[in-house]
Image (cartoon, rainbow, N blue to C red):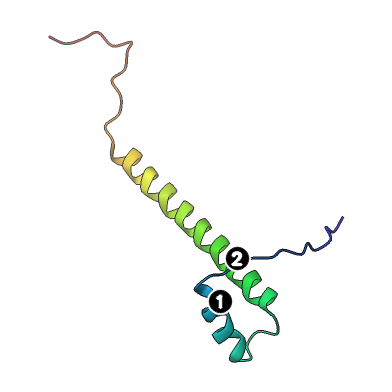
Amino acid sequence: MTEEPKTLTVDLGDQQNALDELMATGRYASPSEVVQEALQALEREDALIEELMEDKLQGVLDEAPAPADATEPARG
């Protein structure tokens, strides 16, 4: 089932100039295309950051000393 597109009004503030410049290049046919591509880039960036964080966490876990086995008697 395909969801119908929704209309959204956004105040871009200072970024309106950036959108206007992108539109002026002719690369984008509409402001919607600019926003859609920007959101796709954000999703890719978020996925990359998550992957990097998971890799870093796994590296830390791999380097951490193994926990002491609670079934072994304490030495001392």
| Residue furthest out toward the left | 76
Say which quarter of the image contains residue 60.
top left
Q: Quadrant of the C terminus?
A: top left
From mark 2 to mark 1, how far is it between C-alphas? 16 Å
**What mark, if any, has residue 39 been given in the picture?**
2
Q: Amino acid at mark 1?
A: Gln
| The one of 46 and 28 positioned closer to us in this rendering | 28
* Vertical order, 59 against 22 (above or below): above
Q: Amino acid at mark 2?
A: Leu
Q: Secondary structure at mark 2?
A: helix
> Would you name the residue on which mark 1 appears?
16
The residue at 63%/76% (across/down) is 34
Query: How many neighbours does mark 2 have within 10 angstroms: few (below 14), some (14-19), or many (20 or more)?
Result: few
Residue contact at pointers 2 and 1, CB within 8 angstroms: no
* Vertical order, 60 against 76 (above or below): below
Foreground disc of the pair 2, 1: 1
Q: Is 10 on the left or on the right of 55, as rendered? A: right
The residue at 16%/11% (across/down) is 75
Q: Secondary structure at mark 1?
A: helix
Total marks placed: 2
Residue 13, given in percent of the width and then of the height, sits at 53, 70
Query: Reading the chain from its start, which is encountered first: label 2 or label 1?
Result: 1
Residue 61, given in percent of the width and then of the height, sits at 35, 38
Say which quarter of the image contains residue 43.
bottom right
| Residue furthest out toward the bottom | 25
Say which quarter of the image contains residue 24.
bottom right
The residue at 64%/65% (across/down) is 10
| The one of 61 and 75 positioned closer to us in this rendering | 61
Query: How many neighbours does mark 1 have within 10 angstroms: few (below 14), some (14-19), or many (20 or more)?
Result: few
* Vertical order, 64 against 72 (above or below): below
